[in-house]
Every structure is written in structure tokens, then in C-alpha cells.
Amino acid sequence: MNQIEPSSIEPLQEAIHAGINLSGTIVSFIILFFLLIMSALASGSESAFFSLSPSDKDLLKNEDSKSAKTILHLLSVPQELLATILITNNFVNVGIVILSSSLLEVFYPIENANETLRFIVEVIGITLLLLLVGEVIPKIYGTKNSLPFAKLTAGLLNFLRKLPPISWLKTFLVRGTKFIHRAAKRKGVKITTDELEMALELTKQESTSDEEHKILEGIVKFGNTDARQIMKSRMDIVALENDKNFREVVEVILEAGYSRIPVYDEKIDNVIGILYIKDLLPFLSEQDDFDWKRLIRKPYFIPENKKIDDLLREFQSMKMHMAVVVDEYGGASGIVTLEDVLEEIVGDITDEFDDDEIAYTRVDNRTFLFEGRTALMDFYKVVDIDGKEFENQKGDAETLGGFMTEKEGRILKNNEFILCDNIKLIVESSDKRRIKMIKAILPE
């Protein structure tokens, strides 16, 4: 038997070793490709599941398919779903980093490498690969095609959330999150209105219309608004004196066009009740001496500083639509209605009985004419400002004319002016009792 020389064995061993290395490299590339796909699916599914609109969910409810049922089930446990996605994504990303480093060592050994170039390839290159292929592109695609992508990944996510060790880590993470949430809830978080307004401004999106944004702003400011800021002043309300006969009452009602009218005794400060016009309907044919005062309902009095969020709840619980606002001496300052409260959130609500007469005149883009009795809140809305500077300086004033009088300590004469928040307020007309007309000039 011929003996094999050692010199002929070495090339054979090198060839076998090279073949093994080549096979291992190919397998590593296949695994890396698979891991990148898994990372993309995990990242895209996060965007897809949490971007589903209410209409998409309605479609899934009406669809009798396994994927639709799986999606709805996963959405019913959002914390478990998010934990599964995050754990899977992190495991996959760690595997990609380790495998990429191993492959880099094969093709670009550290002993033969330039340190700077090696660092760029190993850190920046792998990071960009992960960000683009595993994060950015899948999330954009998942957001734009949320329903198809959710259907594509629903079965896989449902399988992974039951697969150890992901299921163990998921349970631990969800329970830990609930514990932290309970602890944070006990501690409480205080957020100011200014912080909410800032957050609202930062989160404003192009898809949100101006009307929607104004409603959100109204909700934020709702709890800090007093009744006196939105009430109709006693100077502007229609009220009935209790010594009028029935015909006179009907004439006032027809001329005013309101469904509820305050009734007072001798002077407007002494409101004794509210007359509901629907209560008079069965008695329209009665004579002048008809005792209409027995139909008056008990009034609901509130202080000027009553917060309108509390007032709304009281209106709902008491099933009332109107309240009489009284000052510190018990005199009537004005009235506030349920409609006034709701308008602070949704904007002006008009019906067929509302007077569409414009309460101001727009001279040009920067110049407006207002009546002195214009409420400050209405002034803010017309000139489109937040009114913070005015609110800080107004004192007890609630009208534009009252603000100017409060600020100067006297009734300004014609052509006198004040400056506030870079807005120039000029008296156009006044008398010894009040400021009648004001010109407002906005800054350029």
C-alpha cells in the first residue's frame, strides 16, 4: 500500500477549509438577508397597526377572514402587541449587528484594515443599513399602506407573541409598564394650560384643518374661562318687567325672537325668574289681564367667576339652558346660555333667529372699528390674537371700552389712544359716561 505524502495532504485540507468557509459565508449572508426582512416587517407592522383608521377597523369587523380577526384581536391588546414588536425588532437588530461584524471580519480583517475606514464601514455603514432597510422605508410604507401591511404581518406577530422567550419577555415588559403607569398615576402629573397650548401647536399637522385646530384650542382654554367673559351684558339683554300686561309681553316676545326671557321686578338687578316662551303657547288667545307671571320659572344664579366647564356640567345635570350672572353685590351683570358655553369650543353657532349684523367694521387688513361694548373675547377672535396681554392688564373689565377705561383710570376723549400688545386702540367717539366707538390698528 502506497503511503500518502504529508505534502500532498496540506493542499487538500486547505481546499476543504476554504469550501467550508465559503459555505459558511453564503449561509451567513442568507441569514443576514432573512434578519433584514424580519426587521423591516417588525418596524413596518408597528406603523401599520397603529395607523389603522376607524374606517379600516370597521372594514375588518365586517370582513369574515382569519387575518381580519387576528388583527382585531391584536388591537384589543395594544400593549402586548407593541411589546412583541419591540422585543422582536431588538432581537433581530442585535443579530444583524453581530452577523454583519462577523462577515466584515471575513472580508476586511481588522489586522489589515485602516482604523478610520474600518470604523466608518462597521459603525456608519451598518447603522445606515439598519435605519434605511430596517426602519425608515418599512415605516413609511407601513403608514401609507396600513391595512394590507397589517394583514401581511398579523399571523406572524400572533405566532411570535406566543413563542418563548418572546412571550416571557413580553409578559414581563407589559406587567412592568402597568406597574410604572400605576405609580405615575398615583404621583400625578401637573400640566399647565400654556404647556398644553405649546404641545398643541407643536403637534399641528397639515392634515388638521384650521377649524379642527381651533376646536382643540377651545377645549384647552375651556377650563380657564369665566362666565363673565362669555356672558351677554345686562346692557344688551332683552328682559321683561313684571308689571306688564299680557299683550305687552307678547309684543316684546315677537320683537325679540328669543325662546327664554328674564323677568325682573322694578329694576334689572332684581331678576325674579325666566319666562319660557313655550309655556305661553297654550294661552296666546287669552286677554290682556291674563296672569302670565304664574308661568315664570325659578332662575339659576351664578357668580361672575364661575368656570364655564363647571357651568356646562351643571347645565347638563339641571337640564337648564340659561343662567343669570350676578356680581359680588348680588346685582345682575348679564346672562349666559348653554349656546354661549358651547360656542367657546366649536365657534359661533347661528340659527334662523340670530342677528347676522356685523358687530365690527373692517376698514383694511390692519384697521378695525369696534363698538365700545364689544366683549374682549369677541375682539380677540376678530383680530385673531390669543389675548394674553389684554387679560393680564384688563382688571375687572370685560368689554373693549371698559378695558381702555380700566387701563387709563378715566373715560378717554375722542382721538386719545392706548397701546397694548402692539395694538393701537383709538377712541373714535365717547361721552361723559362711556366710550362708544374704538378704532383698532394692528401692527404691521
Image: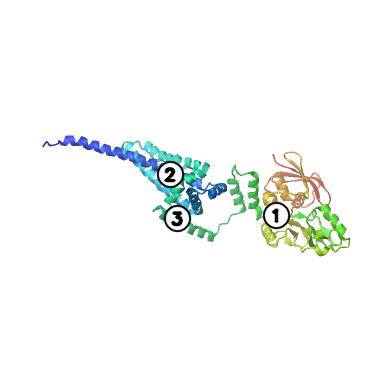
Q: Which of marks 1 and 2 is in front?
A: 2
Q: Mark 2 points at which residue?
A: 39
Image quarter hosting the C terminus: top right
> Which amino acid type is shown beneath numbered disc 3?
Leu
Residue at mark 1 to residue at mark 2: CA–CA distance: 51 Å
| 10 Å crowding of disc 2: few (<14), some (14-19), many (20+) | many
Tag 1, which secondary structure? helix
Q: Name the residue under label 3.
A: 173
Q: Reading the chain from its start, which is encountered first: label 3 or label 2?
A: 2
In percent of width and height, residue 196 lies at 60, 51
Residue at mark 3 to residue at mark 2: CA–CA distance: 20 Å
Q: Give the residue displayed 38% in from the left and 36% down from the top.
A: 117
In percent of width and height, residue 148 lies at 50, 43
Left or right, 107 with reference to 323: left
Image quarter hosting the N terminus: top left
* Residue 105 appears in the rendering: no
Q: Reading the chain from its start, which is encountered first: label 1 or label 3?
A: 3
Tag 3, which secondary structure? helix
In percent of width and height, residue 165 lies at 39, 53
Q: Give the residue displayed 46% in from the left and 48% down from the top.
A: 154
User: Between residues 291 and 243, which one lies in front from this camera angle?
Assistant: 291
* Residue 411 appears in the rendering: yes
Q: Reading the chain from its start, which is encountered first: label 1 or label 2?
A: 2
Q: Which residue is farthest left? A: 1
In percent of width and height, residue 125 lies at 41, 38
Q: Mark 1 points at which residue?
A: 341
> Which amino acid type is shown beneath numbered disc 2?
Ser
